[in-house]
Image (spheres, rainbow, N blue to C red):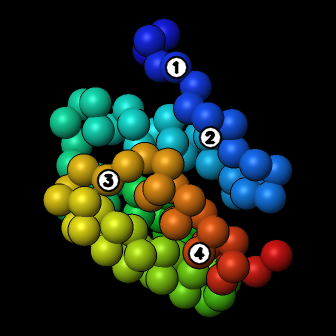
Amino acid sequence: GDADAPSSIAPAASVPPKGHGACVTFVRDRLEKGVIGNELLQDVASSCLPAVKSGVATPQFRQACDQVQHMAAKTIASAGGRPDAKALCDTVLRAFQALAPQ
């Protein structure tokens, strides 16, 4: 909502990964709707599904998706099912970009 005050500005050295803003918005929206734990993990993991199901995903892409799902599961579990949206997105997107084909 409008009550969200911007947090301190991050230094230029820690530029968020591509898609970070959309990811944070998505995760916060899910959390606000009461989607937590495994259900939240399934929602985050489902972002890989269209490419995998359509058959256009390369083996590298599928591997990156699997790895990201494991990292997301750890992050969500360690936060008791309610992770910080920015931290979750940062972890997931950086891992995916490091693993996925360019």
Q: CA distance from mark 1 to mark 4?
A: 28 Å
Which disc is residue 95 wearing? 4
Sooner in the amino-acid sequence: mark 3 or mark 2: 2
Above or below, 29 against 56 in this view is above
Q: Is 45 located above or below residue 89 in the figure?
A: below
- According to the image, label 1 marks what residue? 5
Residue count near mark 1 (Cα–Cα under 10 Å), binned few <14, some 14–19, many ≥20: few
Marks 3 and 2, how far apart at CA: 16 Å
- Tell me where residue 60 appears, x and y as whole percent: 65, 87
What is the distance, in whole Å, between disc 1 and disc 3 at their CAs?
A: 19 Å
From mark 2 to mark 4, how far is it between C-alphas?
16 Å
Q: Nearer the viewer, mark 2 or mark 1?
A: 1
| Horizontal relation, residue 41 to residue 8: left or right | left
* N-terminal label among 4 and 3: 3
Q: Is residue 62 visible?
A: no
Residue visible at 39% across and 36% down in the picture: 28
Label whose residue precedes the other's in the sequence (1 or 4): 1
Q: Disc 1 residue type?
A: Ala
Residue carrying label 3: 83
**Residue at the location (43% across, 47% down)?**
85
